[in-house]
Image (spheres, rainbow, N blue to C red):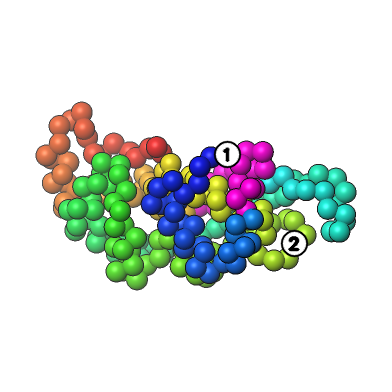
Amino acid sequence: MTTLGRTWWGQRFIAALEGFTDYGRLQRGRSYSGDSRILAFAITDGLVTATVRGNVNPYYGVYKEPHYKTRLQLAPISAPDWDQAIAYLGSRADLIARLLLREMPDTIDEAFAGLKLPLLPRSRKDFVLTACSCPDDFNPCKHIAGVYYRLAARLDQDPFLLFELRGLSRTRLHQALVTTPLGQALASLRPEAEDPTAPLEPA
């Protein structure tokens, strides 16, 4: 199974969830985050979808191994707020330099917090959708919790997913940053082989 929360990003995502989610329920999801349980996983336009293999459970009337559909979505940051965030990121040399090098600054969440904008989830209100087709009415069920952990593992691999989950693609982020005064200045200082205007790609 993929190691979970190996980096700051995955660890902070899980730590943020622990702040407002039943810890026991969340922990149950760890065993549901591997490939033997999550049969399909995708992130499209900020929407996380997964198919999770469940268990036979006569108590719930489940007599055949079920496959549950799970969906998660963080509340998107509005376009005006993204404009504000881009302007701020573009004014900070320490932030924009790393972002244009396809590196996520360790202080990015603090920068967004200073703008009073959410990046990592802070409360249940940060999720506009957490749904599972299983019969467990408690949220998170173990299938949703499993998808949380899988998402943390993806953030370990590609922290730029944080922006996509909040409604801004990496391509749009990059295009906006390179048009700021600092972005243009950095572009003029780099050799063509290290052109920072090249689109960001997943790690």
In magenta segment, residue 35? yes
Question: Disc 2 marks which amino acid?
Answer: Asp
Residue 6 on the magenta span: no
Task: Kindly identify which numbered label has been placed on residue 1.
Answer: 1
Query: What residue is shown at x 60% (from left), y 46% (from top)?
Result: 33
Crowding at label 2, few (<14), some or many (≥20) Cα neighbours within 10 Å?
A: few
Residue 18 image point, x, y percent: 52, 64
Question: Which element is circle 2 on?
Answer: loop
The quadrant holding residue 136 is bottom right
Q: Identify the secondary structure beneath mark 1.
A: loop
- Picture coordinates of residue 52, whole percent (x, y): 68, 46
Using residue 21 as the reference point, say whether residue 83 is left or right of it. Answer: left
Residues drawn in magenta: 29-51
The numbered mark at residue 136 is 2
Which amino acid type is shown beneath numbered disc 1? Met
Q: Is residue 15 above or below residue 179?
A: below
**Residue 187 visible, this angle:** yes
Residue occupying image coordinates x 72% and y 44%: 53
Q: Quadrant of the N terminus?
A: top right
> Relative to residue 51, is residue 114 depicted above or below?
below
Relative image position of residue 100 (x, y in whole percent): 25, 44
Mark 1 or 2: the one toward you = 1
Q: In the shown orientation, is residue 122 left or right of residue 190? A: right
Q: Position of residue 69 (x, y in %)?
A: 69, 50
How far separated are the C-alphas under marks 1 and 2?
25 Å
Residue 45 appears in view:
no
Badge 1 crowding class, 10 Å Cα cut-off, few under 14, some 14 to 19, many 20 or more, is few
Which quarter shows the C terminus? top left
